[in-house]
Image (cartoon, rainbow, N blue to C red):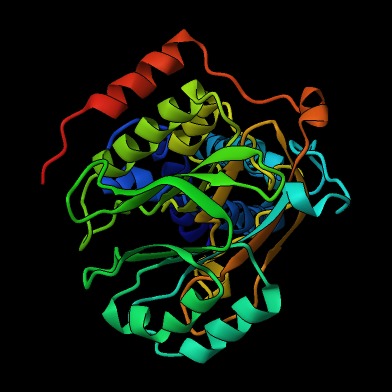
């Protein structure tokens, strides 16, 4: 039994520390995802080791010591997304509708056919902006009725699981669909005008995940995220970046994105809000995000109920409150991190 525990412990330890290697190959990237699951498994394994204490063999003592180090590391990475950590965005009551907006975002799962379930979620949420991913022509046709109320649209349905549908009842300025990395990967780039007349920049993304069958490397995803992060850093308007980023909150890339863009994450200090997988609770990660500049404060955020997709949709209500921006401290990248972001943003990607 001790040998079996030792083998399981070694596998877990390796899975923790392999994720520290900065390599674009999918194996190293995907090991960043289940940090919460690994933390739980290591705690269970340590509980099993308890029955064999005191362990006299040096080999087993080293293994147990490495398990404790793994726990400290995993807890450090996950801690900012627990309810015990400091909140990064200020929560405010809804007091000024002209400077507020609701954003509904959902990866609908292209093969999902429960159109009415999603339409009912949208109707009950009453968002100002809707962003639907993995949408093809069938989804575009099913969502056609949204155009009666949401008169500003950007539609790029595709059959490759990277189609998108964007609807807004707020006025758009210079709206466009961009292809930042590959011709088959669309994204949203637009300025949005609130009822008050205040404007903000909005980017909607859905980069490729680093998994077999999609892309063996994270190069394209990292490049797309860093290109937008650098744009956000230089943006003179308040800005929002959102979508299915196919990365976990505690990954190196997401952390670099936050620091480079200097955008706030409303999840920090509030919880994981894990959106994938809706089908399996034990492999659930936060993959769908919204990041905001310091001019925004949080009114409300929730993960929506199941709608037939393998992702949960999200609903976020924000308030443009420039008077509160000094109460919010955005993350900042140092020179080394900025150089890394620049390198990622300009690296070559295979089509």
Residue at the extreme left: 351
* 203 lies above or below 52: above
Q: Residue 297 in the image: state x and y as whole percent.
A: 76, 41
**Residue at position x 39%, y 85% in the image:** 112
Instruction: Tell me: residue 148, above or below residue 233.
Output: below
Q: Is residue 95 left or right of residue 81?
A: right
203 or 113: nearer the eye?
203
Give the x, y percent position of residue 321. 78, 36
Q: How many marks?
A: 0
Taking the spot 58% from the left edge, 42% from the top edge, the residue there is: 291
Q: Is residue 71 left or right of residue 183?
A: right
Q: In the displayed orientation, state which residue is furthest to the top.
A: 335
- The answer to whether residue 32 is visible is no
Q: Residue at the spot x=56%, y=71% of the render?
A: 312
Instruction: Please indicate whether residue 319 sits to the left or right of residue 235 in the image.
Output: right
Q: Nearer the viewer, residue 281 or 317?
A: 317
Tell me if residue 287 comes above or below residue 108 in the rendering.
Answer: above
| Residue 34 visible in the shown view | yes
Toward which corner of the image does residue 174 lie, by quadrant? Answer: top left
Nearer to the camera, 123 or 81: 123
Q: Please state the horizontal and vertical placement of residue 128, each as a whole percent of the image.
A: 62, 62
> Residue 275's image quarter?
bottom right
Locate residue 314: give its quadrant. Answer: bottom right
* Relative image position of residue 284 (x, y in whole percent): 54, 65
Query: At 39% from the left edge and 76% from the top edge, which residue is drawn?
Result: 109
């Amino acid at each position: 039994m001790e040998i079996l525990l030792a083998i399981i412990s070694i596998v877990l330890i390796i899975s923790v520390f392999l994720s520290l290697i900065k390599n674009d190959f999918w194996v190293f990237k995907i090991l960043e995802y289940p940090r919460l699951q690994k933390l739980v498994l290591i705690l269970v394994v340590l509980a099993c080791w308890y029955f064999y204490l005191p362990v006299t063999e040096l080999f087993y003592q080293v293994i147990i010591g490495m398990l404790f180090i793994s726990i400290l590391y995993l807890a450090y990475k996950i801690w900012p997304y627990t309810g015990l950590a400091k909140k990064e965005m200020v929560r405010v009551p809804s007091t000024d509708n002209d400077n507020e907006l609701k954003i509904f975002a959902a990866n609908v799962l292209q093969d999902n056919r429960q159109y009415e379930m999603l339409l009912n979620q949208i109707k009950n949420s009453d968002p100002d902006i809707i962003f639907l991913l993995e949408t093809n022509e069938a989804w575009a046709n099913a969502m056609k009725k949204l155009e009666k109320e949401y008169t500003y649209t950007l539609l790029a349905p595709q059959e490759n699981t990277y189609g998108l549908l964007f609807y807004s009842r707020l006025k758009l300025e210079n709206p466009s669909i961009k292809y930042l990395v590959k011709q088959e990967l669309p994204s949203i780039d637009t300025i949005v005008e609130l009822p008050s007349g205040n404007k903000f920049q909005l980017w909607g993304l859905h980069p490729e995940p680093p998994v077999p069958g999609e892309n063996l490397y994270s190069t394209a995803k990292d490049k797309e995220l860093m290109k937008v992060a650098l744009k956000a850093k230089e943006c003179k308007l308040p800005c929002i970046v959102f979508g299915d980023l196919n990365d976990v909150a505690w990954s190196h890339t997401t952390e670099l994105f936050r620091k480079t863009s200097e955008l706030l994450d409303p999840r920090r200090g509030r919880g994981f809000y894990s959106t994938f997988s809706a089908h399996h609770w034990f492999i659930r990660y936060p993959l769908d995000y919204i990041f905001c500049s310091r001019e925004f404060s949080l009114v409300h955020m929730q993960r929506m109920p199941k709608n037939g997709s393998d992702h949960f949709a999200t609903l976020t209500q924000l308030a443009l409150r420039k008077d509160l921006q000094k109460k919010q401290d955005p993350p900042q990248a140092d020179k080394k991190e900025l150089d890394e972001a620049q390198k990622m943003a300009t690296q070559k990607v295979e089509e």
